[in-house]
Amino acid sequence: MTLDEAALGAALTRLPGWRRAGRAIERTYRFGDFRAALAFVNRVGELAERQQHHPDIAIHYSEVTLTLWSHDAGGVTARDVKLAEAIDAYCQPTTS
Amino acid sequence: MTLDEAALGAALTRLPGWRRAGRAIERTYRFGDFRAALAFVNRVGELAERQQHHPDIAIHYSEVTLTLWSHDAGGVTARDVKLAEAIDAYCQPTTS
């Protein structure tokens, strides 16, 4: 079930850097170089596999944009928020 | 220097699966799952680092789209063709 406006708004206040993007939420992370960006993508990949929920990932040299939504539900669900939280908890130290 | 129409057309005939996309060339690769797609992205990353030329990479679960152009030249150059050839030579066996 997709989150209602209030729940999504509340979730985003706990996820600095994440923003709405259509039916999804997304965040862009900037790194020092391509290698660091790719290392981040691999960490995100581990978390995504663990949760069996996968963000769309766009790599533009040292910049990575993650886009999260639940295709089956047609919008942002608790699974997306859970994965975003896990990514930021795990990856925060090296991201801007 | 960007390739002229004839040179780009000739290059694309040697790069099956690659197509023009605005000022760039791109190709989409499909894999069995996210893990295989991510492994491919890491191989592409190694080649990109070796050539110091980096494609834009978009991962959508088991699908990876690579977009190649030379920002400094404003279009497709011999460097892009060289990287596309290297990627396909290295990665062909596991891609569709």
Image: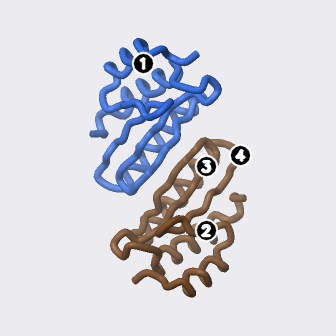
Chain colours: A blue, B brown
| Mark 2 neighbour density, 10 Å: few (under 14) some (14–19) many (20 or more) | some
Residue at 36 percent across and 22 percent down: it is: A12
Q: Pick whichever, B36 or B68, lies toward us.
A: B68
Task: Evaluate whether residue A51 shows in this view.
Answer: no
Residue B76 screen position, x and y as percent = 47, 75
Q: What x and y, as percent, mark residue A19?
A: 37, 31
The mark found on residue B19 in the picture is 2
The amino acid type found where label 1 is placed reads: Leu
The chain carrying label 4 is B
| Residue at numbered disc 3 | B37
Whether residue A24 can be seen here: yes
- Circle nearer the N terminus (2, 4): 2
Q: Are marks 2 and 4 on the same chain?
A: yes
Q: Secondary structure at mark 4?
A: loop
Q: Residue under label 1, please give it.
A: A8
Question: SS for tag 2?
Answer: strand
- Mark 3 lies on a secondary structure that is helix
Residue B51 percent across, percent down from the top left: 44, 72
Label 2 marks which chain's residue? B
Amino acid beneath label 3:
Ala
Answer yes or no: do the residues labelled 2 and 4 have beta carbons within 8 Å? no
Give me the C-alpha separation between circle 3 and circle 1: 30 Å
Callouts 1 and 4 in the same chain: no
Number of the label disc, if any, that sits on residue B32: 4
